[in-house]
Amino acid sequence: MSTNSSTTPQTDTSTLAGSLEAARKFAVPNRLAGKVALVTGASSGIGQAIAVRLAAEGARVVIGYSGNPAGANDTRAAIEQMAKESIVVQGDISKCEATKKLVEETYAKFGRCDILVNNAGLEIGADFWDVTEADYDKVLNLNLKGAFFLTQEFVKRLVATKQPGRIINISSVHEDMVFPHFDSYSASKGGLRMLMRNLSVELGPHNITCNNVAPGAIITPINKSLLNNKEQLQALLNNIPLGRLGNAGEVAGMTAYLASEEAAYITGSTFLIDGGLIRNYHEQ
Ligand code: BGC
């Protein structure tokens, strides 16, 4: 069984440096001024890049993390370097107490929360017949249940105060494309796809939009074991029309756009960032 987990307590500084560089190069200054964004899994990889990018565009950012305080502090330091504001909040969102705490602490500090990025996630690979209940629960409880109830907390406050909002789920090409041996992961991402579609309808009248950003193969800690396996990596690259892996900053750019005023009329959609992988998949 292979385990790829975004909770790996390793800081990928090259990714953070790359994310900062991308934010400096591409961020639209002040596009998110006055907004507060809550990003889960913001201590590494894609979540870290998103937190940095949203801050670069003027949002005050809540850096949600579970098991990697060093990574979360790195995210905060990067944001500070740009003279922007953020706070770090710890919590395992697979538990509802943590989803409540995240939103409470956001309001306690900033008095509002306009943008929610459900990014935290993990994947555990195994043959279908070997998947344990414990591993299934880990994956579904973080990737789907966590996003579900955090979104609920986020939305409750907006509806009660008649405020608009943005929900952006970082799903995966595997919300739609098969991913053999990652059945619980694919089920969680497929679930996120339908959750997003439902919420776009249910929350539209409240001026709350909901969209998914679906990354393909991005260089992050979640696919560390793949990156270390030359043969498997080459097989994957052969399936990617653009012939390379993506980087976290490329996912962050789409997320910032969807969080912005310019995307006010977009809801209920999935945006792929995958180098064309979904159009050209044969086998892992
Ligand atoms: C997974 C990666 C995988 C990529 C492309 C992502 O959702 O997290 O492990 O390499 O999809 O298949």
Image (tube, helix red, strand yellow):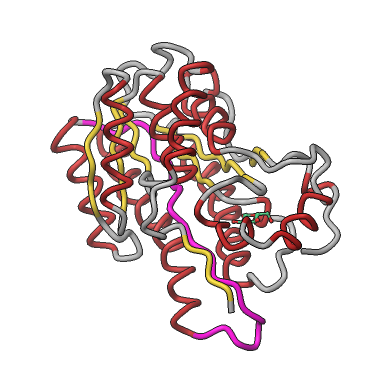
Q: Is residue 83 above or below residue 118?
A: above
Is residue 116 highlighted in magenta? yes
The quarter of the rendering in which ligand 1 is drawn is: bottom right
User: Residue at coordinates 39% horizontally, 39% vertically from top-left?
Assistant: 116
* Quadrant in which residue 72 is drawn: top left
Q: Is residue 249 above or below residue 129?
A: above
Q: Nearer the viewer, residue 214 or 158?
A: 214
Q: Is residue 190 left or right of residue 240?
A: left
Q: Quadrant of the N terminus?
A: bottom right
Q: Is residue 199 above or below residue 141?
A: above
User: Total of numbered circles in the picture?
Assistant: 0
Q: Is residue 101 left or right of residue 263?
A: left
Q: Where is residue 24 drawn, in percent x and y? A: 46, 17
Q: Where is residue 152 drawn, in percent x and y? A: 35, 51
Q: Is residue 267 left or right of residue 14?
A: right
* Quadrant in which residue 183 is drawn: bottom right
Q: Is residue 58 above or below residue 248?
A: above
Is residue 38 highlighted in magenta? no
Q: Where is residue 165 drawn, in percent x and y? A: 40, 32
Q: Which residues are magenta?
A: 112-132
Q: Nearer the viewer, residue 58 or 147?
A: 58
